[in-house]
Amino acid sequence: MKKFKIRYVIFTAILLILAFNEGNRTLLRRFFEQYKLKENIKSAYYQNDLLKKRIYYLENEPSYLEKMVRSELNVTAQDEIEYRFSTPK
């Protein structure tokens, strides 16, 4: 029983020392900042790859250019009928 109390006191003391040490808090904060920055870098690389693919297709595929114009600018071809469906409320 006495060993349990001593271990509990030692564990609590170590935890308090680590928690109230400014260097440890800064280290932990920097670790989480680094994790977020790495995720941002991964996301930027993924978006960069997608944009490179779009540029390639825009330069080399005329059908892709037409698809992009239709979807982003809502353009219809001459003599083309546009169908719109309303959803029931």
Image: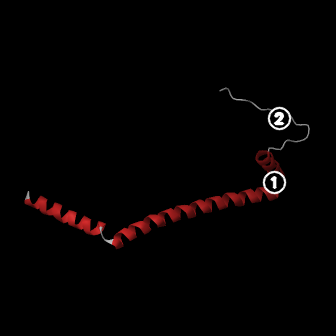
Quadrant in the rendering for residue 42: bottom right
**Residue 19 percent location from the top left of the image:** 30, 66
Q: Please tell me which residue is depicted at 13% across the width and 58% down the height of the picture.
A: 4
Labels 2, 1: front one: 2
Q: Position of residue 75 (x, y in %)?
A: 83, 44
Name the quadrant of the N terminus: bottom left
Residue pushed farthest top?
88
Disc 2 residue type? Glu
**Of the numbered discs in the image, which one, if any, rests on residue 61?**
1
Callout 2: SS: loop
Q: Is residue 24 above or below residue 51?
A: below
Residue 4 vs residue 61, the one in the foreground: 4
Task: Classify mark 1: helix, strand or loop.
Answer: loop
x and y, in percent, of residue 44 in the image: 61, 62
Name the image colouring.
secondary structure
Tell me the number on the disc at residue 82: 2
Which residue lies most toward the bottom here? 23
* Apparent side of residue 66 relative to residue 32 in the rendered image (left or right): right
Residue sitting at x 91%, y 40%: 78
